[in-house]
């Protein structure tokens, strides 16, 4: 199957939903996302069988005057990330099965985000990548502003302004790099083949990296994440945490770091420091919050800190771990938001950790309790789930480069365990006061919800129990000459 | 036909159509005088005819570059663009009863368009001045045509500021003439390339810049813009914002790149050199700052668009700071910008027809009332904000990138522009928020009166063009690039 | 196959229980008992054909091939001891739970998951699968404490979780350093490296230097010691044991604490003999403190479950003492062998005895309406002779009365320790004295003396309850008489480790 479908199918479906009656919108969206997921999964399997085969690519002239090409290519990193996109997309549709309000528009915006995200992950032309990257911003705004919950307009606008500010930095970086490279091409390999003057790298790298890192939720520019998540409807939270935050990290890995390796070497200490602060800080903030979505929003910030930390380590394990953590966090965050937003909030209309005990959810919603327990275990980084394999790789990277960072990191992991445990027990396993009236019966889980949640759960377990193939794919991607300067030479 | 008549065939067609329109207006019965449709269609037919003639007679360069009217690829292309933009502007019909004498109204519009064609077609400063004034005088009249208090105020302001700037322009030209001994920009260019400008000639250049700055609504010469955009009828605003801007920018290109290319100077950070580049950079900074910050506070969409026009002038000028390459990108972006603004104005006019006001509140629920208009507005504003996949994204990207070609010294300017551009998303989204997010409680809002066909054209054409140009920027970029190269080659 | 069976069969049971909507809790409870007892048969069958030269069972799967990380499981004699214990205690605890009314679908499912993970811990030979199972015991254990525990359970459960997690992180970070330096996390491969000093050499050549090895070993030590627990790290234990419902406490003390002991035997001794070697006096001192502190705290406590919890601390202290003393430089072969055998046997015995005691407490609680303070009872022996008799056997076994299970284990430990460090043995004997005091006090306060009027109508064990306790008591007596039935499984390993420890310079 052609990987172009991962981009085309969602975009085409985004237009087609307006032609069909509203009630078909979700089916159409499901079909498109499933197609994208299947294409990605198939490509992953094909790649796994033969790593020596030529990479899938699609290369057409686009804007000749600026040397811009419509250049897509699927190496291992792209493949795992589009697979992640596909999985989260399908699960998101399944968890939006109950959307009644303006369904067609909802799924149209939703699908645009999916298509554009796949586009980012596949692009090999810096401009094309940036175009797809920007395309996500406005649909994201509308998804939250129209279908969100409390403070949705504020949350949506804040998120959008953070995103666009990040994009502005990236745009500046790309423009300066293009001018300075003198290659007349926006192809990433061409741009990265140039030795930029160190003085330029020194200031341009942080500009560009920061631009991407905003979307990756780097402390202290992370504050859009919790407010955005709280305001967003379930599917948007899933996309936001599951995919959109990855776009930023991916951009940093694919564009900012290979282009300016010397600038990166200069700043990587700062990045590592900020990432660590993010991991620890977010975990401690989450410990004190009552709104469950806020807690999970902060957990995303904390987890994305691992991605940034892995990137900052600039060694093979660090980068491996960073990419694996992107995938892992995508699945886990999607899962957490699916449970909290869809399974829990849509039934109880309550996310307050202090008030949830009144519902005695462990008994009234046992299925959700099981899933949330597993999701929390995954989020804590317990082995058997994807987070473990990823964090293990990052820690290996840290050991190799800056072992002394492990002490605060360990504190961060422990704090993550603590706040996750707190959220878990307060939400599902707190017994209601003895004099409280018996909780109302809640509607049972629907097949769509169960399917969506199981899909994500299967994903995180698949990585956690058998990370070998995923790592092989990531290694395949890291073997690209793009990363030679970062890794100090081609991979063996 | 004589060569001159061949060269001026499009202009002639416009003038003849204008006369016909006046005639048609005289023939109308008094009770029908407010029906503008016949003359409107007549005018549109005239523009189409002019366009056909332009295409027919084009292809060959005619007249030496020193001639008052010279035909070359660049002027042909921009005449075509101005005609197209004029077509869209004129296609916005005045609201019923707004215009008492449609024959004269459309005749004036055609005269203005004719002037703009000449602006785009000449390389002679005297002709440039005459043509600009021909357009401006018509526009002063048009701005006050509907005789409301606001329109009169707009017209008076427009006229007063315009007259002062015309005086500046003319006086500046006379000084330049004194320096070069010729009104031909090529001759001026040869003289200026020889060495430093004498002080009086430099003063002349400054004054010319002020004059063009006024036409372009560059801050601090923008004070007329908000009032004209708010008070004048929509057709005139469409004309002022789109066709005029494109023609004026074409003129600025010729003046700066052809006439004073030798005294560009440099606006590089820390390496300023006297010339027009620092001046243009200063104008750009002030325009972007003033435009964007004041736009944030607007409650009237027309005024918002006016400030957005000021801001966009700033972006255009940023392109000029990058020299000829940047100017090329600016020529591309001005078309994209003009399309976006005129499309937005057309939608605003439609909303005013329906709601009687251009206040933000009037846009509430537009998505429900007329999805088509809402979608067109989305496309236009997204383009202005620079969101892919619509054309404005690449337009801005091209301008910013081109400004940095060759030297990254202008990065400070681009950085400011990028920051301002990012901020602009806020106010464009504020409008779109009304359209898509907010819902009105009353049912009567659900229906909108059907629009005249021409109005629909004015709404649909720019939107379609923006999407097309967004997906395939080369459609326009390529011709502009070739035309500029041909034009500059023709000079040397 | 045996490995896969052990890992998957309980999980399958858990899944079935989870999927079986609307099951009668009693039926589900007894089903979980039967299901969790099946592995005993499988293990017994495997043990019958046990040949010390070849592993009982093995299975592996490449987990992260680029780092040579394998999910490698292998069961040998040492594993068999702990597997048997797991296979025995789980159905025992589930039966008690079903009997006292805690059982049900969720309880059974969680206990089965716990069982599967424990099987994993006791067979894993590579850090990754071992850690996987180690960590995954946390969630079911926490939920068991949390959902069926007393009013203090949320806090106790969270503390249990977080403290264990902290230890786990220390272990994880330590092992990852080993991975980077030694290129493997396979226990056997690491033991080989440790034997000829390659590991220390590799570390001294690494950027961190030899100090790194010390830190790594300390981290892993910490993670294991939390689980056992050794004394300054025991703070989570009394609360968790006391607040958890008694059947869960059976699992906690009978099985989860053995994970720590097993970790010391399987990882600490073979991989970091130098670490234990160099610090043998300190570590021995720590074990002594644990023994004495456990006994004294048990003396001071009045809650039956807390008494038994501290007595667990005390008993596992003997295991640790034997372990640490065995690593003393220059110890003789017979002494090492005795100490190690004693530690293994003591671990097994403690699992059985402590779970029997908590089962007795569970039955007692069920009769007293939840009361379980030392002072709430008195003289109930006259009303409940069978309960008191069975409990008495277990209590005296824990005291180390000859003829019962506790004796051979503690005897071997004292034998070994005395041969290496007589002073330690003497101090530990002091601890034994305190143990005797609190056991006797318990017997006196609860069973003997004047009958409290509140419990005048207390019922004795019925046949079902007797049937539940009987196998455990039989095992206690059987091991007391014939400790070889356990030791002959672990002997080959004991011989191996004895040789190994003697080779360490």
Image (cartoon, coloured by chain):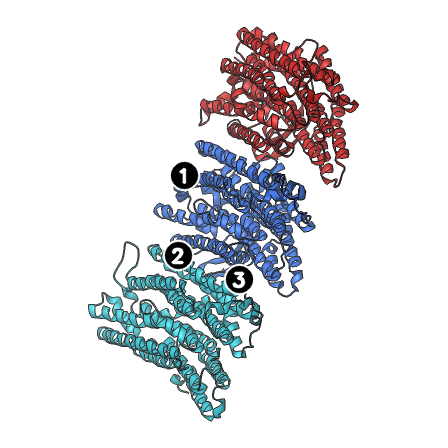
Chain colours: A blue, B cyan, C red
Label 2: element kind = helix
Label 1: element kind = helix
Foreground pick, C466 / C271: C466
Mark 3 — residue?
B437
Q: Residues within 10 Å of mark 1 (few under 14, many from 20)?
A: some
Above or below — where is B162 with respect to C67? Answer: below
Mark 2 — residue?
B419
Q: Label 1, label 2: how many angstroms apart (C-alpha)?
A: 27 Å
Q: Label 3, label 1: how many angstroms apart (C-alpha)?
A: 43 Å
Q: Nearer the viewer, mark 3 or mark 2?
A: 3
Above or below — where is B93 with respect to C138? Answer: below
Label 3–label 2 contact, CB within 8 A: no
Mark 1 — residue?
A269
Label 3: element kind = helix
Q: Chain of mark 3?
A: B
Q: Nearer the viewer, mark 1 or mark 2?
A: 2
Q: Answer with left or right where residue A412 lies relative to residue C462.
A: left
Residue C493 lies, in percent from the top left, at 65, 16
Q: In this orientation, does residue A106 appear?
A: yes
Q: In this orientation, does residue B492 appear?
A: no
């Amino acid at each position: 199957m052609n990987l172009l479908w991962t981009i085309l199918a969602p975009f085409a479906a985004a237009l087609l939903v307006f032609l069909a009656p509203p009630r078909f919108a979700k089916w159409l969206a499901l079909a498109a996302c499933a197609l994208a997921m299947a294409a990605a999964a198939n490509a992953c399997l094909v790649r796994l069988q033969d790593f020596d085969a030529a990479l899938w690519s699609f290369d057409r002239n686009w804007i000749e005057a600026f040397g811009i090409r419509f250049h897509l290519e699927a190496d291992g990193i792209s493949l795992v990330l589009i697979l992640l996109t596909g999985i989260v997309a399908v699960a998101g549709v399944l968890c939006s099965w109950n959307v009644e309000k303006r369904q067609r528009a909802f799924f149209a915006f939703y699908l645009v985000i999916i298509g554009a995200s796949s586009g980012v992950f596949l692009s090999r032309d810096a401009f094309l990548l940036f175009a797809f990257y920007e395309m996500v911003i406005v649909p994201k705004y509308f998804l939250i502003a129209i279908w969100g919950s409390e403070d949705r307009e504020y949350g949506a606008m804040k998120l959008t302004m953070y995103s666009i500010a990040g994009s502005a930095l990236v745009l500046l970086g790309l423009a300066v790099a293009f001018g300075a490279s003198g290659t007349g091409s926006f192809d990433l390999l061409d741009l990265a083949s140039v030795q930029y003057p160190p003085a330029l790298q020194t200031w341009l790298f942080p500009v560009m990296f920061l631009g991407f890192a905003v979307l990756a939720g780097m402390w202290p520019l992370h504050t859009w994440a919790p407010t955005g998540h709280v305001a967003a409807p379930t599917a948007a939270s899933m996309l936001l945490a599951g995919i959109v935050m990855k776009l930023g990290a991916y951009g940093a890995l694919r564009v900012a770091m290979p282009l300016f390796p010397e600038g990166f070497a200069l700043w990587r200490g700062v990045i590592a420091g900020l990432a660590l602060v993010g991991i620890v800080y977010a975990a401690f903030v989450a410990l004190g919050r009552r709104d469950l979505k806020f807690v999970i929003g902060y957990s995303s910030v904390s987890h994305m800190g691992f991605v940034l930390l892995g990137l900052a380590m600039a060694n093979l394990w660090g980068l491996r771990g960073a990419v694996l953590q992107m995938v892992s966090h995508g699945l886990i965050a999607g899962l957490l938001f699916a449970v909290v937003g869809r399974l829990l909030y849509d039934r109880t209309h309550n996310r307050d950790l202090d008030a949830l005990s009144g519902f005695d959810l462990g008994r009234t919603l046992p299925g959700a309790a099981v899933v949330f327990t597993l999701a929390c275990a995954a989020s804590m980084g317990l082995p058997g789930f994807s987070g473990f394999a990823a964090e293990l790789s990052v820690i290996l990277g840290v050991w190799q480069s800056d072992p002394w960072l492990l002490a605060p990191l360990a504190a961060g992991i422990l704090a993550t365990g603590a706040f996750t445990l707190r959220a878990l027990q307060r939400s599902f396993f707190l017994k209601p006061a003895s004099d409280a009236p018996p909780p109302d019966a809640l509607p049972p889980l629907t097949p769509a919800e169960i399917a969506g949640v199981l899909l994500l759960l299967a994903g995180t377990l698949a990585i956690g129990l058998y990370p070998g193939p995923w790592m092989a794919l990531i290694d395949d991607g890291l073997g690209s000459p793009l990363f030679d300067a970062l890794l100090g030479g081609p991979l063996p | 036909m004589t060569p001159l008549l061949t060269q001026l065939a499009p202009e002639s067609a416009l003038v003849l159509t204008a006369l016909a329109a006046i005639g048609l207006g005289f023939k109308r019965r008094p009770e029908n005088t407010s029906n503008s449709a016949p003359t409107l269609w007549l005018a549109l037919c005239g523009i189409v005819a002019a366009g056909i003639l332009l295409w027919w007679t084009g292809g060959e360069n005619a007249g030496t570059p020193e001639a008052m009217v010279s035909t070359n690829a660049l002027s042909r292309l921009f005449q075509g663009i101005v005609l197209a933009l004029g077509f869209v502007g004129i296609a916005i019909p005045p609201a019923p009863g707004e215009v008492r004498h449609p024959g004269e109204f459309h005749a004036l519009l055609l005269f203005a368009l004719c002037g703009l064609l000449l602006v785009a077609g000449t390389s002679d400063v005297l002709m440039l001045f005459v043509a600009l004034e021909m357009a401006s005088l018509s526009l002063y009249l048009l701005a006050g045509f509907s005789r409301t208090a606001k329109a009169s105020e707009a017209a008076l302001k427009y006229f007063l500021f315009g007259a002062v700037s015309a005086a500046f322009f003319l006086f500046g030209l006379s000084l330049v003439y004194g320096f070069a001994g010729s009104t031909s920009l090529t001759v001026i260019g040869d003289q200026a390339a020889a060495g430093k400008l004498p002080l009086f000639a430099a003063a002349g250049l400054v004054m010319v810049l002020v004059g063009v700055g006024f036409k372009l609504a560059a801050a601090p010469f923008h004070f007329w813009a908000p009032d004209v955009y708010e008070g004048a009828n929509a057709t005139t605003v469409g004309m002022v914002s789109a066709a005029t801007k494109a023609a004026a920018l074409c003129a600025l290109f010729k003046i700066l790149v052809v006439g004073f290319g030798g005294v560009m100077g440099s606006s590089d950070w820390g390496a300023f050199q006297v010339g027009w580049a620092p001046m243009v950079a200063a104008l750009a900074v002030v325009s972007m700052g003033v435009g964007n910050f004041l736009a944030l506070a607007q409650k009237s969409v027309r005024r918002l668009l006016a400030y957005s026009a000021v801001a966009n002038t700033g972006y255009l000028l940023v392109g000029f700071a990058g020299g000829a390459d940047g100017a090329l990108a600016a020529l591309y972006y001005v078309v994209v910008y003009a399309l976006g603004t005129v499309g937005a104005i057309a939608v605003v006019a439609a909303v005013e027809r329906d709601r009687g006001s251009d206040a933000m509140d009037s846009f509430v629920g537009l998505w429900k009332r007329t999805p088509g208009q809402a979608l067109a507005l989305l496309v236009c504003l997204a383009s202005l904000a620079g969101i892919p996949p619509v054309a404005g994204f690449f337009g801005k990207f091209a301008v910013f990138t081109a400004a940095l070609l060759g030297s990254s010294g202008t990065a400070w300017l681009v950085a400011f522009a990028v920051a301002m551009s990012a901020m602009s998303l806020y106010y464009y989204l504020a409008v779109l928020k009304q359209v898509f997010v907010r819902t009105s409680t009353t049912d009567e809002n659900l229906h909108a009166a059907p629009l005249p066909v021409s109005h629909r054209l004015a709404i649909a054409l720019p939107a379609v063009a923006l999407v097309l140009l967004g997906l395939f920027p080369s459609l326009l970029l390529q011709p502009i690039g070739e035309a500029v190269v041909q034009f500059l080659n023709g000079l040397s | 196959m045996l490995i896969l069976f052990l890992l998957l069969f309980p999980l399958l049971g858990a899944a079935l229980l989870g999927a079986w909507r609307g099951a009668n809790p009693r039926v589900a409870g007894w089903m979980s008992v039967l299901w969790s007892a099946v592995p005993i048969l499988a293990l017994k069958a495997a043990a019958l054909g046990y040949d010390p030269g070849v592993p009982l069972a093995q299975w592996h799967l490449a987990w992260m091939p680029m780092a040579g990380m394998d999910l490698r499981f292998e069961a040998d004699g040492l594993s068999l001891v702990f597997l048997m214990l797991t296979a025995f205690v789980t159905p025992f605890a589930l039966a008690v739970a079903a009997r006292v009314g805690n059982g049900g679908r969720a309880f059974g499912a969680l206990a089965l998951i716990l069982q599967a993970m424990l099987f994993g811990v006791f067979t894993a030979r590579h850090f990754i699968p071992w850690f996987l199972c180690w960590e995954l015991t946390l969630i079911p254990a926490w939920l068991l404490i949390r959902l069926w525990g007393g009013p203090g359970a949320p806090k106790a459960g969270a503390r249990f979780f977080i403290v264990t997690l902290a230890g786990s992180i220390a272990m994880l970070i330590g092992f990852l350093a080993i991975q980077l330096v030694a290129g493997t996390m396979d226990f056997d491969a690491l033991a080989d490296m440790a034997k000829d000093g390659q590991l220390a050499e590799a570390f001294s050549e690494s950027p961190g230097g030899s100090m790194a090895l010390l830190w790594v070993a300390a981290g892993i030590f910490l993670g294991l010691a939390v689980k056992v627990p050794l004394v300054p790290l025991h703070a989570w234990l009394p609360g968790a044991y006391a607040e958890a419902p008694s059947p869960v406490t059976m699992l906690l003390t009978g099985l989860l604490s053995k994970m720590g002991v097993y970790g010391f035997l399987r990882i600490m001794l073979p991989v970091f003999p130098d670490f234990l070697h160099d610090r043998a006096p300190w570590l021995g001192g720590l074990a002594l403190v644990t023994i004495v502190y456990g006994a004294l705290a048990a003396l001071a406590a009045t809650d039956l479950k807390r008494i038994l919890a501290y007595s667990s601390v005390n008993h596992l202290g003997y295991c640790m003492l034997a372990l640490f003393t065995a690593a003393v430089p220059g110890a003789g072969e017979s002494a090492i062998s005795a100490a190690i055998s004693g530690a293994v046997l003591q671990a097994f015995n403690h699992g059985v005895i402590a779970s029997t005691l908590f089962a007795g407490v569970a039955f007692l609680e069920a009769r007293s309406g939840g009361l379980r303070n030392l002072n709430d009872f008195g003289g109930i022996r006259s009303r409940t002779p069978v309960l008191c008799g069975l409990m008495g056997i277990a209590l005296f076994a824990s005291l180390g009365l000859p003829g019962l299970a506790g004796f051979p284990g503690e005897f071997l430990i004292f034998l070994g320790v005395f041969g290496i460090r007589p002073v330690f043995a003497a101090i530990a004997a002091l601890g034994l004295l305190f143990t005797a005091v609190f056991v006797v006090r318990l017997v006196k306060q609860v069973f003997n003396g004047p009958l409290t009027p509140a419990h005048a109508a207390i019922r004795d064990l019925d046949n079902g309850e007797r049937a539940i306790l009987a196998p455990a008591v039989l095992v206690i007596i059987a091991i007391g008489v014939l400790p070889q039935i356990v030791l002959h499984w672990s002997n080959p390993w004991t011989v191996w480790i004895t040789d190994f420890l003697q080779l360490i310079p």
